[in-house]
Amino acid sequence: MADDDKDSKTEDPSSRKLGKAREDGQVAQSQEVKSFLMLGGALFMVAVMGGWIADKVALRVRVFLEQPDTFHLDAVGLRDLLARLLLDIGLVLAMPIAMFIVLAILGGVGQFGLIFSAKKITPELQKISPLAGFKRLFSVRALVEGVKGIVKVVVVSAIVAALMLPRLRTPELFMDQDILVTLGQIHRLLVVLLISVVTIVGAIAAADFAFQKYKHIEELKMTKQEVKDEHKNAEGDPQIKSKIRQLRMRRARERMMARVPEASVVITNPTHFAVALKYDMDMMSAPVLVAKGQDFIALKIREVAEENEVPIVENPPLARALFAAVEIDHEIPPDHYKAVAEVIGYVMRLKKATKR
């Protein structure tokens, strides 16, 4: 079942799923990148800062060799001396330590940016389950990590052996030269050794980072149904959207019908179109269309108009023109002033005649 589920996940993860995984702290990260940066920092410290650090430490330690008679060898004196020595050396090593801390932070932030997620530190029973731990122990990821560790050990050991064995075969050379020359040679050898190791670890880090990105995408892949469901959730369920649209249309139609009794006249086609116009000579500069409809809606407008004794005038060309050109609650355009004025004038005359 697990294989079938994996085989069905053929779609790349959406940006929404990637974002959700990031919020949960699930990102692609390579420990080899961090190792590469730390080794690079060590190389920089040895090659560039090594002499400065050695001079500062030697300056602090020289007092032990030059003025041993000034030390108090009682408990308090030794404690103060040791505290001062540790403080002095700590101040010298503060810069390299700070550099390693910054590199360790950059090793993570540089890969996936800043993430604030409490889920990674939230206790879960699955994390302490022996069965889950056993599965992780023999997973593909664990196998890759194991192979990667073996490759690193073999390569680094080979580099160390290639550089150190020739020197170990001729130890007498170190006995016949000045100690400063020997220290210089050891420093150069250490720099070359670190450069070689950093180069190899850098290549491993680049390959591992690419693999972790690939593995991360593979773990988050989605089935076609998941993509459809997510798209549906993002855009909204079409059925729900349709129901909401129908509800809005019904409410808008009810509001429109409620205004038909206020109309001054309803112009019809006679059954296919109907428009209701309202005009108050003292309050309006032009008639306003308060309701319009076609077929069934037109019939309802006629019924409401008849129930409320609103005059109905059949004028098919004008009804079709106003239906197409004027929106609800808008004034009629000047092109139709003359035709509408004739209709309203006719209605007004009809009302006067009725009153008489």
Image (cartoon, helix red, strand yellow):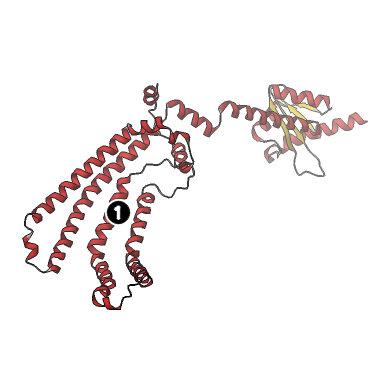
Q: Amino acid at mark 1?
A: Met
**Image coords of residue 110 (percent x, y):** 36, 51
Residue 88 appears left or right of 117: left
Q: Residue at x 55, y 31 (%)?
A: 236
Q: Residue at x 40, y 32 (%)?
A: 130
**Image coords of residue 325 (percent x, y):** 65, 35
Residue 165 appears left or right of 195: left
Which of the pair 79/269 is nearer the observer?
79
**Image coords of residue 349 (percent x, y):** 85, 33
Which of the pair 112/124 is nearer the observer?
124
Which of the pair 125/21 is nearer the observer?
125
Q: Residues within 10 Å of mark 1 (few under 14, many from 20)?
A: many
Q: Residue at x 21, y 44 (%)?
A: 153
**Measured along the vertical axis of the image, is residue 300 above or below residue 287?**
above
Q: Residue at x 6, y 61 (%)?
A: 172
Q: Pick the quarter of the image with the C terminus.
A: top right
Where residue 1 sits, quadrant-wise, is top left
**Image coords of residue 306 (percent x, y):** 81, 24
Q: Secondary structure at mark 1?
A: helix
| Residue that numbered label 1 is attached to | 38
